[in-house]
Image (spheres, rainbow, N blue to C red):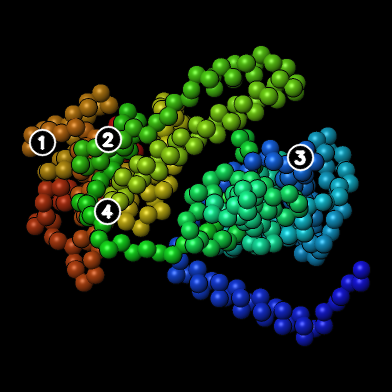
């Protein structure tokens, strides 16, 4: 077979066509909504050689990643993505010659992702002026980027095209000749446009995270508008809102997981039974993580839908985990929910040291004698009585509204004399030079 070399003009024309096609795709996707679906690969439809080859792709990506991290800056910059022979270290630290059998597109994506990570570190170093360390060698590589639909992956037949039922719900992955059946294709709506994907290895199997673009459908009826909301995080009650609703987003470890851990401790390390038990433990942890994510997503949807303003405090969840209530925090999805809320533009953060537990939302009096055992707040100044968590959420909501009122352009803050008791107390607390200690024990 004679290899055809393109001329300079042909190469420029090809690059121009690719660039124009990419611009058209980006413009088309700008008016559409992205959707990521999780498809599980049914590896039973493959033979042993094809199944081992699929798992070998992850190992080869790890070899290549560690090989590139060990190169000098000049050698890394001049690396040729057509390279197939590399040298990596085994578990004993000995150099072993490896030959890559994965598709060339996988080699390019590994090299490109490392370049992006190094550029991000350099940008952060220039911004902060501090050394951020360097990328470390990886003990596992569990995610392979498939960035070109039609080349690295493509859908053979979706739910509607069955071709006599033989290739129904199947996909093709570069390097694997046989089409692979997947579960979850019904999640993709009709008329979706397929885009890039990611091949992910989990304890329960191999998944394809496929990104699709679908048309935006504007609802004829406006969504119901709900009143503004304040959120209080706690240990005993994970989420308490200013409306009086309480959410329990904790998922305890099942007894099966504890039994498997005890069984693993009795087995000989490195044996076949030890590896089987370890894989079962990993699958249990994955199932537990999925349950916590589902609960966090449901609570996030209930809190955010229809709200124009949500006020929460910048709680130190990491510090709570290190304290006396580490197990309660670990079994809950507080960190996941907090991260999702902070990414929402309608969420306003209040300072971590704001005494929401001790400040009265009516008169602004700070009750310093309240303890953790006092589950009901009783203001000694005005006599206001309320559940302490609901009262904290209401105080946070009032503080957030005060912050927004003071930020309005062309409007000066209201003088302290004309403020309510809470606004005056909150403004005095903000202007004080000494801030109170974080009320970790007051939660």
Quadrant showing the N terminus: bottom right
Ranked by sequence position, the earlier of labels 3 and 2 is 3
Image coords of residue 217 (percent x, y): 37, 63
Left or right: where does residue 266 sit relative to residue 290? right
Between marks 2 and 4 in the image, the one whose residue lies nearer the viewer = 4
Tell me which residue sits at (55%, 76%) in the image.
24
Q: Residue at x 80, y 83 (%)?
A: 8
289 or 425, which is in the foreground?
289
Disc assigned to residue 306: 4
- Of 1 and 38, nearer the camera is 1
User: Residue 384 bears which disc, if any?
Assistant: 1
Q: Quadrant of residue 104?
A: bottom right
Q: Is residue 289 visible?
A: yes
Image position, residue 56 (x, y; %): 76, 43
Q: Earlier in the sequence, mark 2 or mark 4?
A: 2
| Residue position marked by numbered label 3 in the rendering | 47
Q: Which residue is mark 2?
A: 246
In three-dimensional space, the C-alpha distance between marks 3 and 1, rounded to whole angstroms, equals 71 Å
Q: What is the CA distance from the residue labelled 1 to the residue labelled 2?
A: 21 Å
Dot 4 or dot 1, earlier in sequence:
4
């Amino acid at each position: 077979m004679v290899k055809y070399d393109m001329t300079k003009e042909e190469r420029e024309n090809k690059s121009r066509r690719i660039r124009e096609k990419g611009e058209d795709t980006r413009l088309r996707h700008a008016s559409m909504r992205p959707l990521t679906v999780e498809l599980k690969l049914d590896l039973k439809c493959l033979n042993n050689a094809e199944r081992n080859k699929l798992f070998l792709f992850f190992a080869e990506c790890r070899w290549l990643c560690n090989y590139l991290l060990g190169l000098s800056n000049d050698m890394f910059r001049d690396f040729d993505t057509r390279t197939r022979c590399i040298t990596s270290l085994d578990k004993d630290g000995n150099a072993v010659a490896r030959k890559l059998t994965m598709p060339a597109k996988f080699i390019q994506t590994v090299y490109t992702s490392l370049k992006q990570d190094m550029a991000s570190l350099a940008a952060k170093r220039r911004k902060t002026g501090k050394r951020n360390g360097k990328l470390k060698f990886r003990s596992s590589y569990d995610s392979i980027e498939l960035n070109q639909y039609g080349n690295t992956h493509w859908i053979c037949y979706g739910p509607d095209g069955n071709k006599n039922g033989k290739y129904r719900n199947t996909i093709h992955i570069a390097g694997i000749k046989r089409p692979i059946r997947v579960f979850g294709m019904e999640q993709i709506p009709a008329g979706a446009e397929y885009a890039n994907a990611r091949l992910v290895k989990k304890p329960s199997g191999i998944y394809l995270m496929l990104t699709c673009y679908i048309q935006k459908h504007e609802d004829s009826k406006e969504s119901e508008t709900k009143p503004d909301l304040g959120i209080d995080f706690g240990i005993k009650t994970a989420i308490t809102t200013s409306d009086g609703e309480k959410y329990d987003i904790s998922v305890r470890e099942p007894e099966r997981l504890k039994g498997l851990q005890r069984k693993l401790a009795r087995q000989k390390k490195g044996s076949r039974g030890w590896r089987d038990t370890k894989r079962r433990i990993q699958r249990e942890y994955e199932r537990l993580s999925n349950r916590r994510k589902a609960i966090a997503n449901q609570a996030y949807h209930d809190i955010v839908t229809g709200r124009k303003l949500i006020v929460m405090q910048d709680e130190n969840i990491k510090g709570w985990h290190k304290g006396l209530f580490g197990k309660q925090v670990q079994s809950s999805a507080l960190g996941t929910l907090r991260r999702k809320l902070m990414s929402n533009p309608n969420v306003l953060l209040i300072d971590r040291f704001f005494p929401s537990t001790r400040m009265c939302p009516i008169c602004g009096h700070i009750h310093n004698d309240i303890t953790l055992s006092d589950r009901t707040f009783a203001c000694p100044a005005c006599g206001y009585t309320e559940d302490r968590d609901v009262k904290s959420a209401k105080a946070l909501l009032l503080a957030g509204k005060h912050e927004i009122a003071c930020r309005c352009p062309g409007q000066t803050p209201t003088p302290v004399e004309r403020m309510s008791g809470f606004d005056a107390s909150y403004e005095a607390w903000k202007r004080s030079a000494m801030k109170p200690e974080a009320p970790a024990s007051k939660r």
